[in-house]
Structure formats: structure tokens, C-alpha cells
Image (tube, rainbow, N blue to C red):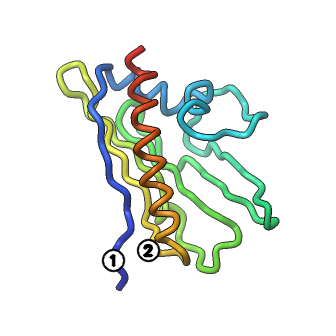
Amino acid sequence: MAEQLIVRDEILIGAIPARVWDILTKPKYVAQWDELPEDYPEEDMTEGSKVVWDLPNEGQSITTIIKAVEHKELKIALFVSNWEIKPTEGDVAYVYHLEEQDGKTLLKMDIGDFSLIKNGKMYYNASVEFTKSAKRVIKELAES
């Protein structure tokens, strides 16, 4: 079996979990640390919320929130329609865990498992860069 390709990172944020949750689920904030389509609705993202991107090769990239435990955990499944191998929903995902620590929040991020798809190392490497940037912006937004 191939070694898992999961990006794991974390950051301590000087804000309570409810504030960090807002940064993770309100489109006006999400658009500052991740990409959203211009016409994305303004409602808070909850279980079942999807972001759909049309790809240049006629496929689609779709993220779907499959688990939302308010102020604690957000799991967003990633699916790309033209992947040769179609993993089970949630096997390739963005998972955000929030842990309250003395009025602060430890945000843990797990992204993957990219070993389940062709060219997984490319997705893994891109996610390493995404995580570095996203966690800093999430921290800045939550603390401001």
C-alpha cells in the first residue's frame, strides 16, 4: 500500500474557537484565504455546502462540506470529476480541527490523502504551500 500523502499543519490563534469558526465558514472571510467563485452566495457554509469550479479540460473540481461540528471540526471533501481513480467521498479532504486552549484556538489542518489519486504528489505539494499561506491569513483575520 502506498504511503499516505496527508499535509498536516497547525497554528495557535489568539482568538476563541467561535471567531476562528467564522473565518472558516463565512464566505467573506474564506475568499481571503482560499479561492471562491465570484458569484458564491453570502450565506455561511454548512454541511452540504459546495464550491464548484469548471476546469479548463471540461472537468469540475468540487468541494463539499461533509461534516460541520460548530467551533470544533470542519471536513470538506475534494472531488475532481476527471480523476482516473475516484476515491470514496471524504477520503481526499480538507479537515480543520479547532481546540480551545485558554481563550485561544489551536487550529489543526489535515489535507489529503493524495496517495489515493494519480499525480497525488503534485496535489500534496500544492497543499503544503496552500496550508502555509492559509493558516497565516486565517490567524490574521481571526485576531483582527
Report the residue at 54% width, 75% height from top. 119
Q: Disc 1 to disc 2, how far (Cα)? A: 7 Å
Asked whether, in this view, residue 90 is left or right of residue 48, the answer is: left
Q: Amino acid at mark 1?
A: Glu
Q: Amino acid at mark 2?
A: Ser
137 vs 84: above or below: above
Tag 1: Cα neighbours inside 10 Å, few (<14), some, or many (≥20)?
few
Q: Position of residue 110 (x, y in %)?
A: 37, 53
Task: Identify the disc placed on residue 3.
Answer: 1
4 vs 39: above or below: below
Q: Secondary structure at mark 1?
A: loop
Residue on which disc 2 sits: 115
Report the residue at 48% width, 47% height from top. 130
Mark 1 or mark 2, earlier in chain: 1
Tag 2: Cα neighbours inside 10 Å, few (<14), some, or many (≥20)?
some
Quadrant housing the N terminus: bottom left
Q: Position of residue 97 (x, y in %)?
A: 34, 42
Q: Position of residue 34 (x, y in %)?
A: 57, 39
Quadrant housing the C terminus: top left
Work out which residue is located at the far top of the displayed protein and give it.
144
Nearer to us in this view, 121 or 26: 121
Q: Marks 1 and 2: CB-CB under 8 Å?
A: yes
32 vs 9: above or below: above
Work out which residue is located at the far bottom of the displayed protein and give it.
1
Report the residue at 17% width, 21% height from top. 102
